[in-house]
């Protein structure tokens, strides 16, 4: 199908071309959903690794997760990774490298779910 040129000699696409391109684009880009929940305060025991659970409506077990806090987490607390353990349930693994319990404050996180 020949392309149309606008008055500046630039290719102008027909509506059919645009619709076709958008349909193909939806097949290429995975389903991505973002969440900005306030996660509750939690305690990680001294010298331990713990999985903390949070409820976030809309998460599915078909999603790979990227999670990051919008505030600094306490020194000595390491976030390993995050995953959806069940529908609407986010788990984040933390390691406390100190000899004392760490109480992490509640805060807003950025959660990105990418449908696998």
Image (tube, grey):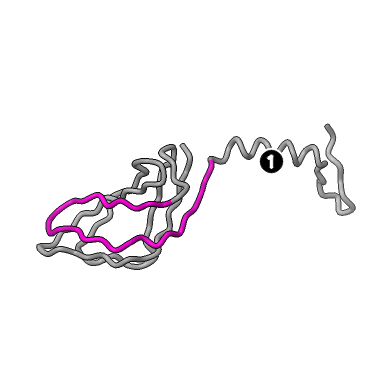
Query: Element type at marker 1?
Result: helix
Residue 73 image position (x, y, % from top left): 29, 65
Q: Is residue 58 above or below residue 23?
A: below
Q: Considering depth in this image, is 94 or 59 the residue closer to the camera?
A: 59
Q: Is residue 3 magenta?
A: no
Tell which residue pokes out farthest to the top in this image.
Answer: 1
Q: Residues within 10 Å of mark 1 (few under 14, many from 20)?
A: few
Total numbered labels: 1
Query: Looking at the rendering, which quadrant does residue 42 occupy?
Result: bottom left
Q: Residue at x 21, y 51 (%)?
A: 50
Q: Is residue 53 left or right of residue 87?
A: left
User: Residue drawn at (85%, 50%), measured in percent from left and top?
Assistant: 9
Residue 70 image point, x, y percent? 39, 65
- Image point 36% across, 41% down: which residue? 86
**Residue 37 lies in the magenta stretch:** yes
Q: Residue farthest to the left? A: 99
Task: Name the side, left or right, on which 63 lies relative to 106.
Answer: right
At 70% from the left edge and 39% from the top edge, which residue is drawn? 21
Residue 76 relative to residue 7: left or right:
left
Assign the magenta stretch its main secondary structure: strand
The image quadrant where one finds the N terminus is top right
Which residue is at the front of the view, 69 or 5? 69
Q: Which residues are magenta?
A: 31-56
As drawn, 84 above or below 46: above
Which residue position holds label 1? 22
Q: Quadrant of residue 87?
A: top left
Q: Tell me if 4 is positioned left or right of 64 in this view.
A: right
Q: Position of residue 36 (x, y in %)?
A: 45, 59
Q: 84 and 4: which one is in front?
A: 84
Q: Where residue 43 sits: x, y (%)?
A: 21, 61
């Amino acid at each position: 199908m020949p392309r149309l040129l606008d008055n500046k000699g630039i290719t102008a696409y027909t509506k059919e071309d645009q619709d076709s391109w958008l349909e193909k684009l939806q097949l290429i880009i995975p389903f991505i959903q973002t969440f900005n929940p306030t996660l509750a305060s939690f305690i990680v025991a001294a010298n331990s690794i713990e999985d903390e659970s949070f409820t976030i409506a809309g998460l599915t077990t078909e999603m790979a997760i990227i999670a990051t806090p919008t505030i600094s987490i306490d020194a000595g607390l390491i976030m390993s990774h995050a995953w959806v353990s069940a529908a609407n349930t986010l788990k984040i693994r933390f390691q406390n490298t100190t000899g004392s319990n760490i109480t992490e404050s509640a805060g807003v996180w950025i959660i990105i779910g990418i449908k696998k």
